[in-house]
Amino acid sequence: MGALQKAQKHFQGRSLAEGARSLATDLKGTLTREREAILLAVDLSDPKNRLRPRDKVLTLNSFPGDRWGRLREMLRVEAPTEIERVEKRARQGMSGLVAWEAEEPLGFVFWVPGSGTQAPVHPDLPWLGLHPGPDEVYCFDYFLKEAARGKGANFVRAVQERHHQLGYRRAYGYVYADNTPALWLYRTTGWKEVGRVKEVRWLEKLVFVDGAPYWMEAHRRRRLG
């Protein structure tokens, strides 16, 4: 069905005003999308939020490590679109942890330490309104391959154990409210909601967060104005 035919359907059996309202509603749903980001934090000093006796000990190596080829091959099979993002993180010198079982990569996460009152250390922080301090971290880009999804809680607690060993007392992150599996995983590993941020996207490129405009670029959003 062409665009003209789709538009005409809104006016069939309706007055001009009713048809116009129906068309406007349909276009709004096409051009815009609203999402709510749930801001989360976890207390790393609480032993319940770290590795438990029954957890399997996973090997965590710093990213990218000497087995980058294996990690890249896993992504080629599991999520090819993530390769560009991960390679960019490597070029940026981002800190990350890769989980391994024997010689097989299971997943990874990136993180940055907080800076307190200094300039934001990650472009997510301004639009999220998060301000992690020097003894806190911001975690992002959690990824676990499909076959290892049952080990997600184990992986998250292992990461939190490592961050605790590094001297951090709290970690922050976010998940979209419609991402039910990820939200469930965070909540079962000690993460608590600390706020919410609603965003409105126009054509997936222009994003408004609390009225502030951002332009979506590859793997980041740029504040306008």
Image (cartoon, rainbow, N blue to C red):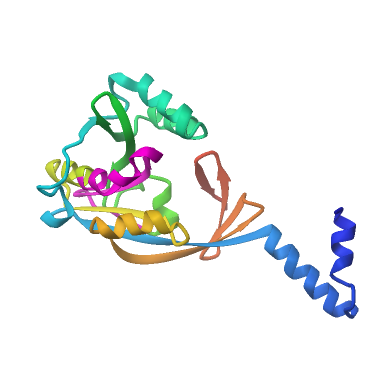
In percent of the image, x 74 and y 66: which residue is there?
26
Task: Decide: is 212 above or below 143.
Answer: below
> Can see residue 212?
no
Q: Position of residue 12 (x, y in %)?
A: 90, 73
In percent of the image, x 26 and y 58: which residue is there?
188
Task: Decide: is 77 above or below 11.
Answer: above
Rendered-image quadrant of the N terminus: bottom right
Is residue 34 shown in magenta?
no
Q: Give the quarter of the image for residue 67.
A: top left
Q: Nearer the viewer, residue 16 or 56?
A: 56
Q: Nearer the viewer, residue 41 or 191?
A: 191
Q: Give the quarter of the image for residue 72.
A: top left
Q: Position of residue 116 (x, y in %)?
A: 26, 52
Q: Give the quarter of the image for residue 179.
A: bottom left
Is residue 143 shown in magenta?
yes
| Horizontal arrangement in the rendering, residue 162 relative to residue 92 (left or right) | left
Q: Position of residue 173 (x, y in %)?
A: 34, 53
In percent of the image, x 12 and y 49: which residue is there?
52
Q: Which contiguous range is marked in magenta?
A: 130-157
> Can see residue 204?
yes
Q: How many marks?
A: 0
Q: Position of residue 56 (x, y in %)?
A: 17, 40
Task: Decide: is 67 above or below 29.
Answer: above
In percent of the image, x 36 and y 45: which residue is there?
140
| Horizontal arrangement in the rendering, residue 112 relative to residue 178 (left or right) | left
